[in-house]
Image: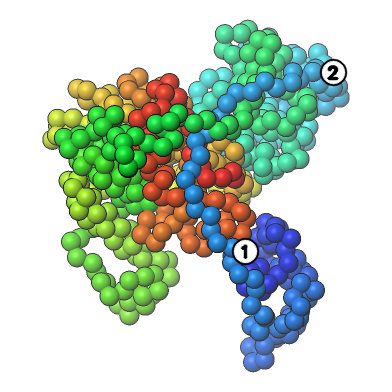
Amino acid sequence: EIAGELATRLNLDTGGDVEELAKARTASAIAELVGGERPNVAFGASSAPNVAFGASDATNATLGRSEPGPAEPAPVIVAPKRLVMAECELALAETPDVAGRTFLLLGRGPLAEAVRTRLTGLGATAEVADDVRAGFDGVLFLPDGGPVLPAAFPQYQAALAATPAWLLTAGPGEGLRGFHRSLAREYPDTLTRVVELSPAESPEARAAAFVAELSTVDREPVVVREGATRKGFRMTEQGLGLLGSSGAGPAGDGAAEAAALGLDRDSVVLLVGGAKGITARFAATLAGTARCRIELLGRTPVPAADDEYPQARDAKDLRAALIKAGLKSPAEIERTIRRIQGEREVRQTLGKLEALGSPARYQSVDMLDAEAVHRAVKEIHAEHGRLDGIVYAAGVIEDKLVAEKTPESFGRVYGTKVDGARTLLEATADLPDEPKFVVLFGSIAATLGNRGQSDYAAANDALESLGRRWPAGRAVTVHWGPWAPTGDHDGMVTPELMRDYARRGIALIDPEEGTLGLLRELAWGRPETAAVVHTASGW
């Protein structure tokens, strides 16, 4: 975002690609990338540095006096498309030429032993170990059941630091698809792939299929092997038919969809993930169409009735007010600003829902506290005698490249999303009658991968596995593309990020169309559809 803003303000010709500029770690590196010279100025000098910015700046202006750049491209805000990750046939991989190559096999059990035997039979050296070491051409993760992520992240991190030619994982496993899709974007020189093998086949058959994936016939990050077939995935547009694309009823306002779901004034819907962002937007859509009761759970503390600083309307004003009140630590000031703004959003959401005719309540619950989650769900059902639907949108982002991310951060991002969802779904099993539907909010990062979001992509991908195992009604994971911010509930797309998306030609989801699209998905989508993508454009 900062790199894009710099390029725009200084009218720099970056060829439309600011990614390299964003990677620069020093002022000198930035100056060199934009075709200029290092500023020759002493600290404390009163005169402005005379820094040239290259031929792209026709005026060769000094810093602070550059000519205005071209007008910012307008953001593109449209209704989302509905897509699915459709299986597609892939060319069969031939037996790879690995003679003389070295492989480190991480894992114990029949599959690891069968892979070792297969590799040595092809003339390679294969060593089974429990920890990563450098000096191997390939690192192969061969888990013997049980979850791989987030516990194995340090091993993946260490393996990739050694820049192997191959990094393969035997699947399936929760989150591994999204994880490897992101790895493929961060490490283009390494063939990184999860190979999903059929548990019905013998270890020897699975080993033969797995070793064949060392072939570089393609760079697919996710491959499914079963018998003689080899499949990958393509994001493919797939409509819902006439009702699903245009809505039902004369206005197409979602009322018919709410009725089709059986939602009315007596219904109760639980939304988890705070009273903010797109969670709040969908709550308002439910209120406007069904007038149902809305229960909200989130991390933000339950706000007091009155605003602490009613005259301070934005972050700048709040910062000044907090400094005047005696706060000195920048970190404490920013934390307080986030808390106050979060509490304001909760008040605003509750007020809007009540105005639309829906009784609404907000509770502060830590989704990683299983006892608190079970208690909250049980009490909601006991109070109203029903719980018709659940929308789960909790999550945090701490974007960093794999090489720079700590295991604690990876676990925090992954656990907040996955463990919270697992606990919530388990809590529904305690109810006398389970909800009609569950919606899990995912991200397009899970389906396409994204640099710096290996943890977030893995976590959102893992939601699909949780949803498929839910034994009650319909559970669907909706992987969202970026939504357009409008100032009241911006979600994860800030106005600054929206400008960056506009420069890159990435369209954003129109908030009203996005929430109506979700209602149509629930009303007219096939119950067997476990995951869909709703996005205005690609990544």
| Mark before the other along the chain sequence, 2 or 1 | 1
Crowdedness near tag 1: few (<14), some (14–19) or many (≥20) residues, C-alpha within 10 Å: many
Badge 2 marks a residue whose secondary structure is loop
The residue at 69%/11% (across/down) is 228
Q: Residue furthest right?
A: 100
Q: Is residue 497 left or right of residue 132?
A: left
Residue type at mark 1: give it: Gly
Q: Is residue 311 left or right of residue 421?
A: left
Residue type at mark 2: give it: Gly
Is 51 in front, or is 158?
A: 51
> Residue 19 location in percent, x, y?
67, 56
The disc at residue 91 is none
Give the CA separation, mark 2 to mark 1.
Answer: 50 Å
The residue at 67%/44% (across/down) is 186
Say above or below: 404 vs 534.
Answer: below
The residue at 72%/82% (across/down) is 61
User: Which residue is identified by label 1?
Assistant: 4
Q: Is residue 302 left or right of residue 147?
A: left
Is 183 in front, or is 475?
A: 475
- The quarter of the rendered structure image containing the C terminus is top right
> Residue 470 location in percent, x, y?
37, 23
Badge 1 marks a residue whose secondary structure is helix
Is residue 443 among what the camera can see?
no
Is residue 267 among what the camera can see?
yes
Say above or below: 442 vs 106.
Answer: below
User: Which residue is identified by label 2?
Assistant: 123
Task: Tell me, yes or no, whether the two marked residues, 2 and 1, touch with CB atoms within 8 Å.
Answer: no
> Residue 180 location in percent, x, y?
62, 34
- The quarter of the rendered structure image containing the N terminus is bottom right
